[in-house]
Amino acid sequence: MAIQWPLVIFSLLAGAGGALLAFVGLSGVLGLAKKARVPAAVGALVLLVVGGCASVAHLAQPANIMAAAANVFSFSGISVELIMLGVNAIVAVAYVLTARGESANATKIVGIVGIVTGVAMTFVVGNGYVMEAQPNWNTPALPFAYLGSGLATGGALFATLMAALKTDEADFRGIMPWVLGATVVQLVAFLAYGFAIGFAADVLLYWGGAVIVGSVGAIACAAFIAKASTMAYATLVCAVVGGICLRALMWLVGTGFLDAFGTAAVRGVWGV
Amino acid sequence: MAMKASMTRRSFVKTTALAGAAAAIGVSLSDSLVEVDPAYADEPVETKVVKTSCHGCIQMCPARATVENGVVTKLEGDPDAPVSRGSLCMKGLNQLHTMYSPRRVLHPLKRAGERGENKWEVISWDEAIEEAATHICDAIDKYGPYAFFASVGGGGSYSFMEAMTLPMAFGSPTVFEPGCAQCYLPRWSLSKLFYGGIDQSIADNAVQEIFRTGDDNKAEVVVLWGAQPSVSQTAESGRGMAELRAKGVKTIVVDPNFSPDAVKADVWLPVRPATDTGLLLAWFRYIFENKLYNEEFTKYWTNLPFLIDPDTKLPVEAKELFPDYVSPTPDNTPAYACFDARTNAVAPFPYSAPADSPVDPEVFWAGEFNGKTYKTAGQIYKEQADPWTLEHAEEVCWVPAERIEEAIKLYTGAGVAGIANGVASDMTESASQVPLGCMGLDSIMGYINKPGCTMTQYGAAGAPPTKRPVTYNNGFDGMFSDMYGIGAVVGMSPAENEARAKALGEANPQQKLANQLLIDRLGMKDHKGLYAWCHSHIPTVREAIATGEPYKPRVWFDMSGNKLAMLGNAKSWYEVFPEIDYIIGQYPMLTSFHIEAADLVFPVREWLEEPMVNMTQLNTQWLQNEVVHIGETVSHSIPAAQVIARCKEKWGGSLPGLVPGYIGNATEEEVKASVAETLHAPSWDELVNNTDTYVPYVTPPEEYWHYNQHETIVDDGLPAGFGTESRKVETYCQILIKLARTGYPFCYPEPQEACEDYSPICEFIEPAESPVNDDTDEYPFVLTSGRVPYFHHGTMRHAAFARELYPAPDVRINPRSAAELGIEHMDWVKVSSRRGEIHGRAYLTEGVHPGVVWMERFWNPECYDASVPEEKQTAGWRECNVNVLTKNDAPFNEVYGSYTNRGFTVKVEKSEKPDNIWVEPEQFAPFLPTLHSEPITKDVF
Amino acid sequence: MRNCLVIDLDRCSGCDSCIVACKLENNIDLGNYWNQVIAVGPTGTHPDIEQYWLPVQCQQCENAACVHVCPTGASYRDEKTGVVLIDKAKCIGCQYCMMACPYGVRSFNQKEKVVEKCTLCSHRTADGEGVPACVHNCCCGARLYGDLDDPSSDVAKAVAAASPDAVHHLPDPGSAKPATVYLLSPKTAAWKELV
C-alpha cells in the first residue's frame, strides 16, 4: 500500500501528544520539572489538535470528519482514535485548568489520569490497523510499536521542553531513566514488530531508520540527557525519525491478504 | 419487443431511487443519464429496447440495445439466442464507446496535408464521390482498367462481396484481402474440392452441428486444430464450447499456445508452430498402422482405394485399364480402378452403394498392372505418413509421443468425433496441406455427415439430394459461374461442362472478358486456389505496384480497416504507397493506414447503425438493426456503388467491366429492403415495427438438420454421394492436380498456364524460417500468434475499456527463456525478425514452449491522437505491430499463395516502452465517448 | 439470506468481458474496477501444466470487516437483500474499508472521493428479478447469481450439483467467511489456496 502521509503524521503527533501528556502526569508523580508541566500539557493539546487535523487531510473532504464524529459510537478503529483524541484533549485542558487552581492533589490526579489516557493514545493510534486483511499488521506488536514510538517521542519531547525551559539539572537526572526507558520500550517494540513480520521490510527503513537511528540512536542520546540537556533535542530527532520510518514501512508492508485488484492492475498472475 | 416507457428524466431518477437499494448503494445512474445533454434534462425520457445483432466479430451474436431518447445506453446479449444464450463479449459491449467515440469519422474527409501528416478537410458527399470518380476514370482512361484495384479485410468491415465485385465493374482483376489466403479461403475452398461440402471452421460459422442444444447434440469428441473459439468468438462458439464441455464432450486442442480452450482440453498438443503437417501425418500413420480407421467408409466413400497413375498422379479410370469395360454409371460418375481383395486382382471399381459394390477394394496396395506400377491413393498416403512415428513427431513437432497417442485414441475411440480446423494453418506455408490432413482424418474415420461430427451439411446446402450432387466454383456457391459463364461444375462430365460453357458463352459474350480477367489476375499462375474467391495474390500485387510488371495498379479503393496492421510485412507495403496515385478508404475511424496512405475517406456506419442480417445461430437468423444513426455515415456497400454510378455517368452510361459487376446496394433503402426480404418480412418498416414477428427467422429443425445425405438414393438410382468428380470424398484430392495444370475448375473454359503440381494429400513442410532451417542462431525463437479476446482483427483499439485492460500486446514467453534474457513479467521487450522490430510486454508463462514466443497483432491509435502534440505524432503501426515482423515472401503455400504470419523466427531483447504508447488506464480518457448529443440523422443515400 | 455469485471456473475462459460489462453497467471510471479476472497459473512445467481463471469481486463476506471498520456506517449490509453495500452519501473516503477488505476488491473513486465496490448490480437485482450485468453477459455461462439459502436458486442448485471437492471459497484470513462460491473440479485444475 502507498504510504498514507496524513495518517503517518496524525499517528506520530497524536501518539507523541498522548505520551507527552503522560510525561506531564509522570513528572507530577515524581515531583520533577514543575516548570515544564503546563507548557507540556499545552504542547500535548497542540499536538493532539494538529494531529487530528492531519488525519482529516486523509479524508475526501475535511468536513467529512463530522460524519465520523457523528458516528463515534460505531467503535471502529477510527472512532476509538477520535474518542481518545477527545479524551486526551479534555485531560490536557483539565490539567492546565487545575494547574492554575489551588489543589495540587487535583492536578496530580488529573496528571495520573493523563498517564493512563496518554499511554492509551499511543496504543490506539496503532491498534486500528490490526486487522485480518493485513497479515503484516495483524499482530499486537504493531500497536506496541506505535506505543513505543509514541512514548519515546513524547518522552524526548518532554525532555526537550525541559531543556528549552532550562529546568534544573536534578530534574534531568530524575526524568532521564524514564525517557531512556521509553526509548528502550520503543526499541523492544520495534524489534518485536520486526520479528512478527519476519523482518520482511525495507532494510533501510526498518534497520537503518527505525532501529538504529530511531531507537538505538534515541537510547544513546537519552542516556546523556542528564549530562547535557541539549541531548534531549537529539533524542527527539532520533525518535521522530524512528517513528516516521516505522510508520512508513508499516504502509509499505501492508500488501493485503489477497490483493486482487492490485494484482490485476499489473497483469499479475497468481499461483506461480 | 420494443417496450416503451415514457416518463420524465426526474421521475426516472426517482423511480430508480425507489428501487430500495439503488438509492443507498450509490450506483451511479449516470450510465444511463449523465451523458444526455443537460438541455434535455426535463424532457420525457423514452426508453426502448431494440433487438439487434452485435457485429464485434463475424459471428454476430443476437443482442439487445437499450435506447434512451435516441441514445444507446446499454447493450446486452439476447438470452433467446440458441448458442450465445445471452452472452455478449467485450468486443460487442464496447461498441457503446466506439459508436460515440470522439474519433468517429462522421463526414467524408479529403486529405489536406501530405500523406502521413494526418490533416483533413471535411467535404460534402457529392464532392467526395466526384473526387473518387474523377481519379478512377482518369486512371482507367490513361492506363486501362487494370490500373484500378480494391481491397478489404481487417475487421469491422462487411464488404467482402463488394470488394470481390468492385474491380469486376471496372474490368480489373485485382482485389485482395489480408485474410483470404491467410484466413479461411484455404479451408473453405478445399472442403469444396475435397468433398463438395461444408468446411471445418468454427469461427466462420461453418461448424454448427457440434453446438446443437440439449439432446440434439450428439458430439462426443471435438478436436480444435489451431482454433481457439473461446478467444476469437467468445460469446457464440466460445459459449458453445463451454456448454459442450459442461455436457461432457471431450476435447483435444492442437495449439502451440495454452489457449483457454487448451486449458480446458482433455488433451493438449502444443505443436511447434507451423509443423502441424508432421503431427497430422503421425495421426495418419498411427491410425493406418493400428487399423483404427473406418474401413467401410474408407473403402467405399473415399477415393483412397483408387489406383493412381504414377505419370499423371490422377486416379486411373476403369476404361483406361480395361478398354472394353462399360461403366454401369452415368458419364458424370466415372468408374475407377482398384485392387479387388475378392479376386486378388486389379479390377474396375464402379460407383455404387457399398453393399452393391462388385469389388472389395484394398485401401493399401501397390503392384504392377500391364507393366506399370500402380499404387492406391491409400498406399501413397500411407507411404507419406510412414516416417511419422510418434517418436519422430515428438522430435520434430515438440509434442510428447504419449500425449499424441492419447489424443489419437480419444479421437478414434469415439462413436463420433470431428476436427474443427482453425485459422492457424492458413497463415503458414502448409495452408492447403493442413486442411487436407484434417479433413482426411475425419474422412478415414467416417466422421462425415453424421450427427455430432464437424463435416456435416445443413440448411439449404444439406437438403436431401434428389440428383447427383455437383459443386459450382468461382465465388460463393459459384455465383459467378452462371453470371459470366466461367468455371467448370465439378460433378458434371467433361462433355456436359463443355456444352454448358459453350452455351453460356453464346448467351453472354462477357465470358471472354471474365475468363481473361481470370487469366490476368496477379499471382494466378502459381496459386490458382485463390480463384475460389476471385482474389489476387497479395505479394504479387505489391510487386506489381513496385515494378509495374506485368501491369501497375495505381488507384486503390480499400473498403475496411487498418491495412498496415493487417498486411504481412507492413513496411514493405508502406514503401510502395508512393507508387500509388490515389487511395480511397472507408471506415468508422481513421487508422494508421488512412493516416499514412489515404487521400479520401468515406464515413461508414458502426454496427449499431447498419441494417444487416446476422450470420445465423444454428437454424435461427437474426436482425442487425439500425438502432441509431449519427453523422453522414452510410452502410458499407454504398460508397463504392455511388462512385461506380458517378463513373458510369462520366463515361456516358457505360462501364469498362463486367455487368452486373459490382454487387452491393447503392442506397439505404435497398439495403433495408434486402434485409427485410432475407428475414421474410414484407418491408423494412414492417420488420422494425414488429421485430418480434420476424426475428429470429427460424427454419424448422427438421428442415435444417440433415444427415447421411450421401447415402440417399437419387434419380439415377445411385446413392447421392458427394459433389466431386468421383462422387466420393476425395481424401486424395485429385482435383488439385488438375487445378495446378490448367486452373480447372475455376479458370475455364480458357485455361491458366500450368505450374508445379500441388500435393493432393497432406505432406510435411518444415517452415522456411525455423530452428531446423535457420543457418543462424540470431533468431532463436519461433513466433506464432493468435487472438486475444479484447479485439477482433484490427478493431477496437479505440475502445478505452478494452485498452485499459490490454494496453499493449503481450509477448508470451516461457519463464526459463525469459530468465536467460533477464526479462521479468511485464517488462517491455523488443522483438525482431529479419524484416523489422517492434515492442511488446513480456508475459511470462509456461503456456508456451521455451523455444516459442506468442504475440498478437496490435496497432496504436493513441500515437496520432488529437491529444498528442503534433510533432510527437506517429501513425501507430510501427511500435507494437506484429505484422512488421511477419514474412510475405516465398515460399508461399502452393495452392493459395498464403504467406507466413505464424511460425517464423525472431529474437527477443529487454527494451523500453516506445514513446506515445499509452499503458495507464487514465491515459485512454481521450477515447471515451463524447458524441451522445449528436443528432440522429436521416439516410444520406 | 446470502445473495451472491457462484462462479464456475470449469467454464470461465478468462475473457474479461464481465469486467467490461460491469464497468459499462455501473459507469466506472478508467482505472477503477468492481470486478477483475486473474489468471491462476499456468502452474507446472511446460507441457505438463494447468491453469484456471479467478474472477474476483466483493465476496459478500458473512462477517464483513469492511462493515465493522467503517466509521460512518457507509459500508453496511442491506437488510432486505443481505448484500454488503456502500452508501456513497455516508462515505467519508477514509478508505479504512479498503485496508480491511481481505481481497483487495474495493476501489476509490477519485472523482467522487468515495469508495466503491460490486453491488451485485443491486439496481437490477434488488427486486428479485434481474441478474447482474456480468452474469447476464458472461460468455461462458460461468457466472450465476442468487440466494445460497434458497434451494431453488440457480446458485444453490449449482453448488448442490457440484461434487464436494469442486466447491471452493477464497481463503479466509480468519473470520471473514466469504460467501461467494467458486466451482472448480480437480479435472480442470487443482484449487490453489493462494496464501
Image (tube, coloured by chain):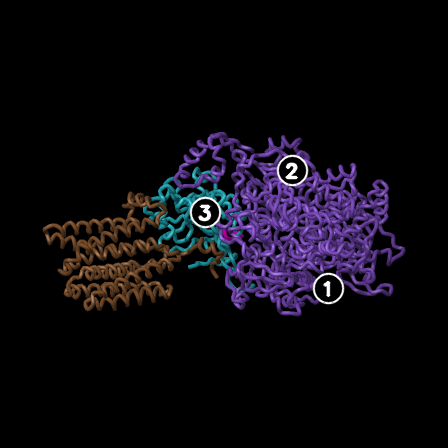
Chain colours: A brown, B purple, C cyan
Q: Amino acid at mark 1?
A: Gln
Q: Is residue C9 magenta?
A: yes
* In this view, the mark in front (3 or 2): 2
Q: Position of residue B181 (x, y in %)?
A: 70, 53
Say which chain tag 3 marks: C
Q: Farthest residue toward the left? A: A102
Query: Dot 1 corresponds to which residue?
Result: B384
Front residue of B148 and B841 = B148
Q: Residues within 10 Å of mark 1 (few under 14, many from 20)?
A: some
Tag 2 secondary structure: loop
Q: Which mark is residue B124?
A: 2
Q: Amino acid at mark 3?
A: Leu
- Confirm or deny contact between disc 3 and disc 2 (CB under 8 A): no
Bounds of the magenta span? C5-13
Front residue of B729 and B125 = B125
Tag 3 secondary structure: strand
- B367 left or right of B608 in image: right
Q: Which mark is residue C138?
A: none
Considering the image in quadrants, where does the N terminus of chain C appear?
top left
- Rounded to the nearest angstrom, the CA distance separating label 3 from label 1 is 54 Å
Q: Is residue B597 magenta?
A: no
Tag 1 secondary structure: helix
Query: Dot 3 corresponds to which residue?
Result: C5
